[in-house]
Amino acid sequence: MSAISDTDPRVAARNARAEAIEHTGDAGAWVYEPSPPAITAEPFADDPVATDNPIDWAAWLAANPDNDAWAADRMLAGDRSLGSVPANLSSTRIALHRLATYVIAPARHGQNGKFGLRSTLHGFGTPFFGNDRQIRVVGDRLVDQIGDTARSTPITTLRAAASFLDVGIDTETAAEHDSPPVGDIDQELAVDAEASLFLGRWFAMAFAALEAVRADAASVDPSRPQLWPGHFDPAIEVGDEDHRGSYGASPGDDAIDEPYLYVSVWWPDRIGLDTSDARWNAPSFPGALLRLSDFGGDASTFDPVEIATQFWSDTRDALG
């Protein structure tokens, strides 16, 4: 796919909730991505499901079938396909992981002490912070929105990205044990637009499914979903002090070079987890995983949100 230009509507200033309200005519319409205004107190981010009367998106789409593309684009309902996995996904993933960890997340942290990221339409980015600012990635472009004005630039190097955003390169704040090294900050970041947009769909799928698990009454003390920049995966925590685990959607890593879902059990000894059971198939931690290649069938024939929701719910229930 060709590079995204600075006139592409996908890099324009956005208000996701206002778009949803305008599109549906429903003041309770929230989608699973950040919206302004910036939240200036804990937890410093809006909650996309904090409404007493959430829209049943499947029912809404059934009544408004001409809106399939709009709903599917946001992984709300309809034809929620991930599409085929680009051949160069790994190199793009590593490059964007570096950008997220060492430039984008620290920019938010410098304002409010938080570095969690979120899924955004066609990509990922920060919640709104400071003076209604949001930094996000769309394809091979870096977008800096303040209020109702947005500017964008091609993603080239870490130094160029930090200069564009007028922030420093921070190697400490958001990095984790499995983060790629910061590396040469003048090295060209290998970001392919098609692979980046696929990652955007993967993250959107994950947030939609994680919010469904979070909203399920069977989920004990669920945390809010975040895209952790150091690990570069969306995740939540669910369970009581003995049965707690991390539920997430990795876009791939050094050990498993394809996207996968996982549940990592925090205290396997407390519940006597039988790791000989084929369910607990994670190779490097106590828990379960499901590779994208095992979702089943062609990517256009299954609903990835339903598969992820079912995998996480079934694994949660198996933990007791």
Image: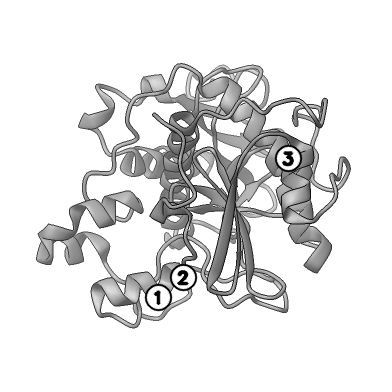
- Residue 167: image x %, image y %? 81, 54
Q: Residue at x 28, y 80 (%)?
A: 26
- Residue 145: image x %, image y %? 59, 64
Question: Any mark on residue 15, and which?
Answer: 2
Give the mark nearest the N terminus, 1 or 3: 1
Q: Amino acid at mark 2?
A: Asn
Question: Any mark on residue 18, and which?
Answer: 1
Query: Left or right: where does residue 18 sit relative to residue 110?
Result: left
Q: Residue at x 37, y 21 (%)?
A: 294
Query: Left or right: where does residue 181 sit relative to residue 274?
Result: right
Residue 189 sits in which quadrant? Answer: top right
Question: Any mark on residue 251, and which?
Answer: none
Q: Which residue position holds label 3? A: 230
Query: Left or right: where does residue 76 sit relative to residue 46?
Result: left
Element type where label 1 sits in the image: helix
- Above or below, 246 against 144 in this view is above
Residue 128 sits in which quadrant? Answer: bottom right
The answer to whether residue 195 of the structure is visible from this angle is yes
